[in-house]
Amino acid sequence: MDYLLYTGCTVPLRAVGYEIAAIKVAKELGINLIPMEEFSCCGYPIIFLDRDTSLALSVLNICMAEEKGLPIATLCNSCTGNLTKANDLMHKDEAFRERINKLLEPTGHQWKGTIKIRHFARILFEEVGKEKLAARVTKSLEGANIAPMYGCHYLKPTNIYDYFDHPDHPVSMETLIEATGAKPVEYVEKTLCCGGPILALGEDMPMDMSERILTGMKKGGAEAAVVVCPFCNVMMGEYQSTIGEKAGIEYNIPTFYMPQLIGLAFGFTPKELGLKKKQVKKAFGDILEEVE
Amino acid sequence: MTITDKSSVKSDEIITADQLDLNFKYEVAEEIGGEGILQCFQCGTCTATCPVRKFDPDFNVRRIIRLTLLGAKEKVMTSDFVWLCSTCYSCYELCPQEVKITDVMTALKNIAVRNGHAPENIKGHIPILTEFGQLGEITEFENTIREKHGLNLIVQTPDKVRMIFEKSKIKDLIEGKGGDL
Ligand code: SF4
Ligand code: SF4
């Protein structure tokens, strides 16, 4: 199985460990994530300014993948959302297609409608599956309680994602956590928005929104959290101690990207997954005998 | 308090008929993504589910839609509220009238931008994307780490992004050249 790996802007700048782990884990499962040599922003950051320009940037990247004849695998929820929405509208909305084609004209690219876009976690859930994942596990994470955090654009709007998972009671991340031997933490805030998309307008609101999620995880007994979007990680991970100070709660919930979690269960070292030893020890020190 | 007692209403919140632009709702309905707005029957499901509303009671998406339907264009366009929508799609999934609220909110933002009300921080994305094709520069620092982990080196190629920006005239749009307010 071959996919072009579309990393977008945030992953290479703030979450390269996500990319490193995804490629390694994919390879173990017989999936080649091939780097896209020429790619640009998916346009999501400017959707507030002008929707057509934003979605045209997505279509540009889709065209470049089409020319390689390969589907796109994504890591960021917002990239997934913008690319999928753009592709969906190109298929269904003739007026949209005409407008976007005009915007693309000077680039020399043309949309053909030949490829699909898939979030890497969705590929693991749908195309690999729990059984095959579990069969490859060499260091079970049994005994760990891990909170899944979905973010928004991995699941919603459901109509562009063929309703592959439920928007309020999803199971795909839990399924992947279970494959590692760990136990998913059940908490109602797991599908709430981290506020990342409005971070550019001020950090107070996203911090409040994320506090609600972190507190839900904590109450549910989470020892670690797993995310599938770099922006969820910015809020759950990078902002965690600041949010905790403000709320007067010590969260102590190390966050991991899904492929990093799976990679640990596959026996990769933290370093091989772009992780810090300290973080892995904190979350799984009592489960993984030796963390090198 | 009797029903004629308006002491709890701030005077700048009262909307009078002469401030209304009765055409505004059609303008929004014609905007891409705004099509569903005329279907709203004001049930309030959107407001009830909104995670932003939870922390800012003034951010009321049902009310924004009602103000738009009434024609309070200036009020909607100049308020901070449209920008607070985080595009989480929670309301979109639950709306019984298929208003596609998240898209309506994006349409309102886009109209506000063309009328010169784009927040500076979001406007700032355009020069960055023009320069790098991505929302930041990939320097030798990032590429050294990539090399160490066996990843491909990234060469940023902004030319096609620039072509699309030129064609869509986004630089004029964000300066408010394209609106009518
Ligand atoms: S949920 Fe839909 S119909 Fe109900 S108030 Fe919101 S937009 Fe209107
Ligand atoms: S999409 Fe916007 S308005 Fe709707 S629930 Fe989310 S933040 Fe609120």
Image (cartoon, coloured by chain):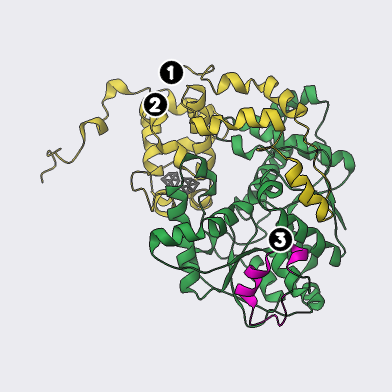
Q: Are marks 1 and 3 on the same chain?
A: no
Mark 1 and mark 3 in contact? Answer it, CB < 8 Å.
no
Residue B83 or B34: which is nearer the viewer? B83
**Residue A105 higher or lower than A275, as above or below:** above
Q: Position of residue A204 (x, y in %)?
A: 42, 48
Whether A184 is among the magenta residues is no
CA distance for labels 2 and 1: 9 Å
Q: Does A78 sit above or below residue A191?
A: above
Q: Amino acid at mark 1?
A: Leu
Residue B100 lies, with reference to residue A174, above or below; the image says above
Find residue B73 and name its label.
Answer: 2
- The Cα–Cα distance between marks 1 and 3, rounded to whole angstroms, is 45 Å
Q: Which mark is residue B181?
A: 1
Tag 1, which secondary structure?
loop
Q: Residue at x 76, y 42 (%)?
A: B140
Mark 3 — on which chain does it sit? Answer: A
| Above/below status of A229 relative to B13 | below
Evaluate whether residue B91 shows in this view: yes
- Residue A125 percent across, percent down from the top left: 73, 65
Report helix, strand or loop for mark 3.
helix
Q: Position of residue B109 (x, y in %)?
A: 50, 32
Chain with yellow colouring: B
Task: Tell me the tag on residue A121.
Answer: 3
**Residue B65 circle label:** none
Q: Quadrant of residue A244?
A: bottom left
> Is A178 displayed left or right of A5 in the figure?
left
Q: Residue at x 52, y 48 (%)?
A: B92
Marks 3 and 2, how far apart in space? 42 Å
The segment highlighted magenta reads A270-291
Residue A95 in sight here: no
